[in-house]
Image (cartoon, rainbow, N blue to C red):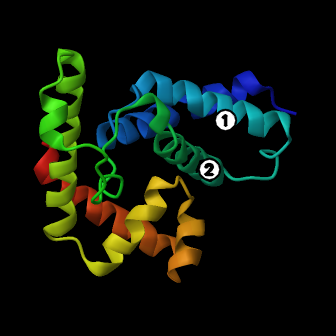
C-alpha cells in the first residue's frame, strides 16, 4: 500500500493549481489555506480507505468539489451581503438610528443601509425569476443537489444559475 506522503507528493502540484483557481474566483480564503484544506480532505479520504480504487482524476475532482463547498460554507468568517436578508424589514426609523450619539452604531447602520440598497439594486436589476428563486436556498447553506431537488432542476443547473448571479453581482461589487 502506498503511504500518504507519496499520495500527497503525487497530488500536490495539481492541488495547488486547483486551490489557486478557486482562490482567483473567490478570494475570501487564501490559496495556501485552500491547499491545506485539500490536504486535510485527502488525508481523511486516505485514512478511510476511499482512495485505493479511485483514479487520479476522480480523486482530484473530489478535492475540487470539497474546496468549492468549503469556500461556500465559511460564511461565518466573512462579511457577506445577503440579497434576501434585507427584504423590507426595519424595526426603527432609519433617521432615528443615524442621530444616535454612538458614532460607531451610526456608522454600522450606514453600512447596513448601504448593503440593503445594494441588495435591492441587485435583486431588482437583471436577475431572472429562477435566479431569484435560488437566492433563499443559497443563503441557507444548502448543497447544490439539495437546492436542485427543491427547485426541481439538476445540480448542474443550480451551479449555472449561481454562476450567472455571481457575474451579474460582480458589476455592482467591483
Helix, strand, or loop for circle 2?
A: helix
Residue occupied by mark 2: 62
Q: Position of residue 60 (x, y in %)?
A: 58, 46
Q: Nearer the viewer, residue 101 or 153?
A: 101
Which residue is drawn at the image coordinates 48% and 63% (left, top)?
137
Labels 1 and 2 touching (C-beta < 8 A): yes
User: Residue 29: which disc?
Assistant: none
Residue occupied by mark 1: 41
Relative to 43, does residue 160 appear above or below in the rendering? below
Q: Quadrant of residue 123?
A: bottom left
How much space separates mark 1 and mark 2, taking CA atoms?
9 Å
Q: Quadrant of residue 126?
A: bottom left
Badge 1, how many Cα within 10 Å: few under 14, some, many 20+? Answer: some
Viewport quadrant of the N terminus: top right
Q: Nearer the viewer, residue 56 or 83?
A: 83
Relative placement, left or right, of 125 versus 156 is left
Q: Position of residue 14 (x, y in %)?
A: 49, 37
Helix, strand, or loop for circle 1?
A: helix
Relative placement, left or right, of 153 versus 113 is right
Relative to 151, does residue 163 appear above or below in the rendering? above
Amino acid at each position: 500500500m502506498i503511504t500518504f506522503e507519496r499520495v500527497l507528493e503525487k497530488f500536490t502540484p495539481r492541488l495547488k493549481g486547483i486551490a489557486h483557481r478557486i482562490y482567483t474566483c473567490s478570494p475570501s480564503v487564501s490559496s495556501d489555506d485552500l491547499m491545506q484544506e485539500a490536504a486535510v480532505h485527502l488525508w481523511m479520504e486516505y485514512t478511510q480507505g476511499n482512495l485505493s480504487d479511485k483514479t487520479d482524476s476522480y480523486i482530484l475532482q473530489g478535492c475540487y468539489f470539497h474546496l468549492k463547498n468549503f469556500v461556500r460554507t465559511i460564511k461565518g468568517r466573512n462579511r457577506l451581503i445577503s440579497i434576501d436578508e434585507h427584504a423590507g424589514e426595519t424595526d426603527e426609523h432609519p433617521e432615528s438610528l443615524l442621530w444616535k450619539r454612538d458614532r460607531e452604531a451610526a456608522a454600522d447602520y450606514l453600512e447596513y443601509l448601504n448593503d440593503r440598497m445594494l441588495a435591492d439594486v441587485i435583486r431588482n436589476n437583471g436577475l431572472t425569476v429562477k435566479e431569484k428563486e435560488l437566492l433563499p436556498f443559497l443563503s441557507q447553506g444548502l448543497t447544490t443537489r439539495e437546492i436542485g431537488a427543491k427547485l426541481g432542476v439538476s445540480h448542474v443547473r443550480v451551479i449555472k444559475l449561481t454562476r450567472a448571479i455571481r457575474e451579474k453581482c460582480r458589476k455592482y461589487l467591483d
